[in-house]
């Protein structure tokens, strides 16, 4: 498949924003300082931004802002440190952080790009601050609702029974019928580093199992270094163990606030961890959005060309 992304670029400015609670967020700006402002919301939660995300945007036409969310990537404190307090890392905190960054950079309105967890965060941000969003470009559509969190941590055992049993058996027997994300979160903060490492490996093994049914899906988290596995698993289980700190059904309920915001939702047919009906139901209540289903794509691959085409179209209109 032809790589439709733009050439690699480097930031023209970087910084760290003090958002309170002891958090310093890493941010960078790329492309054209006078271009169309756009902000990138990474997935996970807890993954951090990557250089490849810059390449979705035409550097001659976009002013691209990327940042690592609390406890992720180059932001501090990092969740991979032996002891870290995640109590001031919630969705409301992240929504305030996005606004603080926008104000800090002197941007009035911007396009919001989000993938996976970044979709949930992007939708919540746009519904909270619709006057600050020009467009939404979203890939791998997700929901914070508890039915989907249960689908990923428990019900998908019907699709991958062998792998799921190994995942379930990674927590104490007394907790195997309860909230597996919350149980893993406790293990990931255990005083014993061996317990933490084993839990992180099993969580990341399960993540790589369920993210896609596409035949070309490749392992990512399960082969990462132990510290990165711990950082990712700690943040994602913290969020999932608390229902992503969002009221069930909120994103669909408040989708009317997106009425004047155009956008695109790109979703892979082979994305088993994010069932297509999440995007389908959202499209029914957000008529200004275009839903594109890529038949041979999964959760993390095969969606780029559609996104790049959409962003190029916005930049040249």
Image: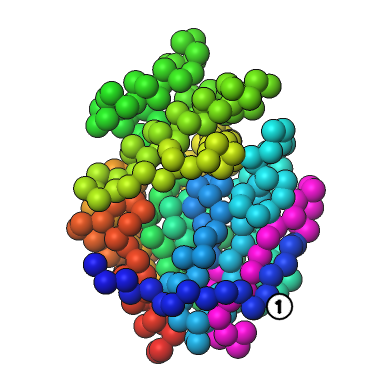
Colour scheme employed for the rendering of this structure? rainbow
Please name the predominant secondary structure of the magenta segment in the image.
strand
Tell me: residue 95, above or below residue 258: above
Q: Is residue 2 left or right of residue 196?
A: left
- In which quarter of the view is residue 168 placed? top left
Q: Is residue 212 magenta?
A: no
Q: Which residue is mark 1?
A: 106
Q: Nearer the viewer, residue 183 or 108?
A: 183
Which residues, given as a range, are shown in magenta? 18-39
Which residue appears at 74% of the width and 71% of the height? 104
Q: Position of residue 138 (x, y in %)?
A: 41, 63
SS category of the residue bearing label 1: loop
Looking at the rendered image, the quarter that the N terminus falls into is bottom left
Which residue appears at 79% of the width and 47% of the height? 21
Q: Position of residue 241 (x, y in %)?
A: 54, 32
Q: Position of residue 64 (x, y in %)?
A: 56, 75
Which residue appears at 46% of the width and 20% of the height? 170
Tell me: residue 70, above or below residue 108: above
Tell me: residue 177, above or below residue 232: above
Q: Residues within 10 Å of mark 1 (few under 14, many from 20)?
A: few
């Amino acid at each position: 498949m032809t790589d439709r992304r733009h050439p690699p670029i480097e930031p023209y400015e970087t910084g760290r924003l003090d958002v309170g609670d002891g958090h310093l967020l890493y941010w960078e700006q790329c492309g054209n300082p006078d271009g169309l402002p756009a902000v990138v919301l990474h997935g996970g939660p807890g993954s951090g931004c990557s250089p490849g995300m810059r390449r979705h945007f035409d550097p001659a036409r976009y002013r691209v802002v990327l940042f690592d969310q609390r406890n992720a990537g180059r932001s501090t404190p990092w969740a991979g440190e032996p002891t870290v307090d995640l109590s001031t890392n919630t969705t409301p905190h992240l929504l305030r952080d996005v606004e603080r960054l926008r104000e800090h950079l002197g941007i009035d309105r911007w396009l919001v790009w989000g993938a996976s967890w970044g979709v949930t965060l992007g939708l919540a941000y746009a519904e909270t601050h619709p006057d600050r969003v020009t467009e939404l470009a979203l890939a791998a559509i997700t929901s914070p609702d508890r039915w989907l969190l249960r689908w990923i941590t428990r019900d998908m055992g019907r699709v991958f029974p062998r792998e799921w049993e190994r995942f379930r058996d990674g927590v104490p027997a007394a907790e195997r019928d309860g909230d597996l994300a919350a149980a893993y979160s406790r293990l990931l903060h255990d005083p014993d580093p061996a317990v933490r490492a084993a839990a992180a490996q099993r969580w990341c093994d399960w993540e790589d199992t369920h993210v896609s049914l596409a035949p070309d899906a490749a392992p990512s988290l399960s082969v990462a270094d132990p510290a990165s596995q711990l950082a990712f698993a700690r943040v994602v289980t913290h969020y999932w163990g608390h229902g992503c700190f969002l009221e069930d059904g909120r994103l669909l309920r408040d989708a009317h606030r997106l009425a004047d915001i155009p956008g695109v939702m790109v979703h892979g047919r082979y994305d088993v961890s994010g069932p297509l009906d999440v995007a389908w139901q959202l499209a029914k209540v957000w008529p200004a959005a275009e839903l594109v289903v890529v038949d041979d794509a999964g959760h993390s691959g095969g969606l780029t060309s559609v996104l790049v085409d959409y962003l190029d179209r916005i930049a040249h209109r």
